[in-house]
Image: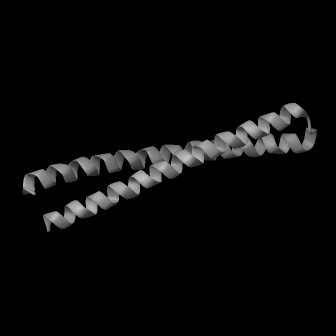
Amino acid sequence: MLRFVVERSLRDVGRRLRKAREELAILDEQLQVFREAADDTRIRFLVSETPETAREALVAGRHVDAMAGAREALLATIRELEGRQDELLDELA
């Protein structure tokens, strides 16, 4: 591949990788908040044992699971981008 094409692709992958890492940092902060909220709802359920608090605890747990799944997908994207970046750097060398 032509050098300028590889360099342009490398810049594009680098930009996408930075954006994905920024998104991961935000997602990590959000996930922490969701986990804390889920812990609070579980404690409230254990104390009150009402159907309403049971439902709240279940919903909060599902939110945490969904956020964790999104985090794993984003990590997979980051790994793919890092692999592509390595390939491009090898082509450049």
Q: Residue at x 27, y 58 (%)?
A: 85
The quarter holding residue 36 reads: top right
> Left or right: 42 with respect to 60?
right
Whether 73 is drawn above or below 63: the answer is below
Q: Residue at x 81, y 44 (%)?
A: 42
Residue toward you, 25 or 68: 68
Query: What percent of the width, then of the height, locates residue 49?
Result: 92, 39
Q: Residue furthest front?
A: 1
> Left or right: 38 with respect to 82?
right
Q: Residue at x 57, y 42 (%)?
A: 30
- Colouring scheme, one of rainbow, by chain, secondary structure, one colour: one colour
Q: How many marks?
A: 0
The quarter holding residue 89 reads: bottom left
State the quadrant of the N terminus: bottom left
Whether 71 is drawn above or below 85: the answer is above
Whether 83 is drawn above or below 17: the answer is below
State the quadrant of the C terminus: bottom left
